[in-house]
Image (spheres, rainbow, N blue to C red):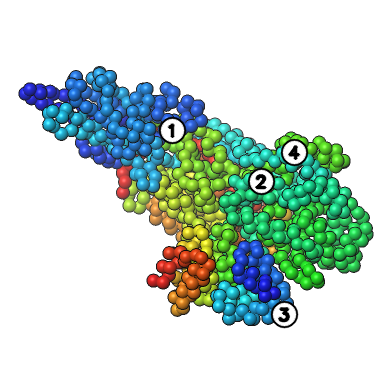
Amino acid sequence: MVNIALEGENALNFTVSMSLDLHRTGDPDGLIEINGNGDWVWGKTADGGIGAVVLVNHDDDDGSDTHDNADGIINADRDKNDLAPLRIKTSQEIPDTWNISLSVDDYTKLRVLRGDGEVLGPDRAAPYQLTVADLVASRGESGLPLFMEAITFASQGFDGLVKLTLTVTPPAILGLQPVEDEATVRVAPWMIPHHGVPATHVYVSKLDSNADFRARLKTEVIKSRHGGFRSVGLVEIDVKDLVEWVDIAGVVDLFAWCAYRGFKTLLEYTGGEADTNAVRLFRDRLIELPSWVAKEAGVTVAEAAGDYGMTEAGFGALEFSGPKNSELADYRDDFDGWIAVGQSVRLEIGDELWIQAFADLAGLNLDDFLDYAGGTADSNRARAYSPGYRPCTIVLPPRARKRTAIDLATFAGYFGLSEAELGELDRWRNDEIVAHYGVDTKVYLAPPATVRIQDHFLAWLEFYAGACDKTLEEFLRFPAPSDARTVAEQMVDLPCRIAVDELDPWAQDCMEIGYTSLPGHNITSVLRASRNRTLHHYPRTLLAAEVGDWQPGDLTHNTTYDSFGNLEVTPPVRGPDGTEYPWGRIYFGNGDVDSQFEPKVRTFLQQQVVQKPFEIHTNWLSVGHVDEFISFVPVSGNPSLSGRNRPEFPYRVLLASPKAAHVALLKALRSLDARRHETGLIFEGRSFDGFNIETDLKEYDDNGLEAVLGYPPATTMTALNLKNWNEEVQGIVDGVRRVLIRELGILDNEIIDVPVLYHRNNVSRKFDALTTAMMNMLVINGHCIYPTPFGPTCKGVDYFKADFEAKLTDLGLVPHAIDDWNEYHLAQGEVHCGTNTLRKPEPAHWWEFIAP
Amino acid sequence: MEQHFIDAVASSGHTYAHHEAALRVGGSSAVDVLNRHLHDADPIARLLARVLLEQPRVPAYQSAVAHLEKLPIALARTPAGGPRPSMVQDFLNQDYGADLVEFVGLRLAKEKSAQGWRVLGFILYLGDHRVVSTSEALIRFATETTDESWRGFAVDAVRGFDDPDLATKLDAEEARARVAGHEMPPLVRTLRR
């Protein structure tokens, strides 16, 4: 408050005050007058807390599709709920010669609004001088009403505090100094609700490939509505709406000719799944003409087909241009280099199917094909081929070579193979190998073109769908045409587009649905991950009244640690130093020295203060997210627990435990009665990369698992390997356990061991869950929707599942097992990774936090 | 073959790979060329000659490269989305120990435009083994790369080598860069301290 008291000739006596909404006191109008030096102090006012609070007004109350704080107006009546009031009152009439102004110390962080618009802030970055009308209003009962909104959350270089200064400047003639009053407001922090907070919506990506999973999820979500819990809605994110498409209509006719081959074989090749996942490697690049079209400019496809001695022309590879991206330039060079050289390419071919495939490609029977190739081919060796897996060699005519990789891939599907075995690819000149390409056992050909060829297939699948004016789903069910030309004609001149993005199934990773609170009022605040995959578009689509979105980091950072499966919060805890964290503590995997959690996001989280983050070691995992092995659940509804609960911590930590898995495995083995020749299974009905891994339990215990995991070459996971790997993981998890106890002040018996077996991925050399990581689950209103483990099973009992369900039930929780094996587990995620949750917390009195 | 060697030393990326492949399968004429360059004035030329003459290790080189090609494919559909450098580092260490350091050094010097996970994985691997015969490759990479972050990792790795000939190697690289019309980046110069 500014008091002015002058006597004599200039006698005056008035006060000017500013009042801000602190909501910390019992003031009937919710405002208190600011007096003092403008400090901001944490705590209840009654306990010495000082200062006011303001919200980042980043929702969209007026449906303008922009944040409300992006402009200098009050966006609809309900927007006032998101604004913090500020009033200026004067005690009596003030002479016109006196000047009263309001300013802030950073105009980019706070905006002050009057009913008719901004008075100071980003667009009016200068002190606001009260007008005569303002002064008249300020003398009224409620003073001059103003409103405040924050422009940004606390972040790097901004601690969330903004100082307001009210200045009363006397007329110069009086020779008096200006008098000031200061107040500080703190921007409300962004916060994450914990697993015990009521959930209202579950999100999952809507893809063709996870249709079965979604159906199962829906069933369990509906079940979770029973038992007195509030209802939960399931929101399916239509990822196809978010995918970036590129129009390539101009080249449709050129590709029409290849339609026949495309339909059936591509669909078989993809096994009914369509996903342009790998194409995302080319995100943000333009798609140009397919390379061979460019190369064959002026040559009709028909002519080209004739040149190749084929009845139909195949399609070439797509080129993706990106002048800013050197990787692309490399690719183009590589590919061009490969197809431009004029010698034969010799393929070591390990299966007669390929010979037949090439014959079919040429529209010839096998003998004719070998004759056809005979001009330059080592046809004798091809003829010498006999059924089985004896290797043979065939030399392709030079001009057929450019499509070899694609043809091979296509034919793999044509012959119903999930993958095609190729030998190595040598380039020959004058009977001398001039280049050698190490070729893996998949259909991919020489590096680095391997990835791209796969990409092209997936991209082309989308392309065909678009060319037929069908959705991908419809396209996959489209029958193979009997007449290629008819289809080709149908396709000519149809508009076409191609997706340059993946069909992203990881709903958890794209966003963290948090909130930010004013007294009595929340805005749901969706934090966008620094993750440059398709779903990064999704959070913005949620922008609405009372729902905002925010992105504290750069999309280009884009490491695995930046996904928000790697960002979680504990329930309320009291740290070992006695600090209360009423809204829990944020935790995340810190990353590698060379691949870190986005520093801007780290700083952002630290600057929110009240959920002080701590870091967990996760880089031992292929994916490296905290949700892969840690979860928190509320303890509820089981009276027998009362004696085992600390009242201040009615929660439990669920932590992956290979040791618990081993115990459960032994228990299962002991349950078998050898005299009755009882047997058990592990991974019942499961496959991994197309290999059936269902194994007799005793066999598993004695000899491990014979399976191809991760990627060829095959890895046999011996019993010794499995033992060593799981002991190593247990050691790592034990270290994490100590961190949790140290940071959260919890007791050892408040951590529940969840049986999970791990293996070392032979490609990434990191660890992956072998059975499902059951704690990687959805926790909604006391219900736990977790992935079926497919653990050791004897006489119908899955011992991992039974162990986990017994532990959850004991806590008063309701377990719901759901099969996510094919849709998520095989892709190194689980239920939690594939879903997201909107929770509705009570507004937080965060200013009462007592910092340590 | 001589021309292939000259072009290999002068090039990078896939053009380099082409010339390297030609030398690798070039038979006795290639071996003659490589032997002649074992004492080349250019340290990268010497490294190239040494690596390509190590015929017993060729299968290891090829299988290592093939494995690295699989990494992005294997991880594309996972929540991780792609590889990270420590995966390369772990793989090379677990499967090959120190056997591939010179090969990796050579590839690092020649793959200036490769993906970050691969580049940094190579640097981490070289940093683990501190073989002084690879310090010139790291210095060359640090001099030529346009990525400041990668340069920093490479410089840090060299700093950890305690290479007694470091000053001489830096002088040679600085002279080479100057002839090529470039300045050695200041960060690389800090290795002199």
Q: Give me the chain letter of mark 3.
A: B
Q: Are marks 3 and 4 in contact (CB under 8 Å)?
A: no
**What residue would you read off at disc 3?**
B28
- Report the Cα–Cα distance between label 2 and label 3: 44 Å
* Occupied quadrant, residue A153: top left
**What residue would you read off at disc 2?**
A287
What is the secondary structure assignment of the residue under circle 4? helix
Q: Are marks 2 and 1 in contact (CB under 8 Å)?
A: no
Q: Residues within 10 Å of mark 3 (few under 14, many from 20)?
A: few
Is residue B139 in view?
no
Q: Position of residue A128 (x, y in %)?
A: 29, 29
- Report the Cα–Cα distance between label 1 and label 4: 41 Å
N-terminal label among 2 and 4? 2
What is the secondary structure assignment of the residue under circle 1? helix
N-terminal label among 2 and 1? 1
Q: Residues within 10 Å of mark 1 (few under 14, many from 20)?
A: few
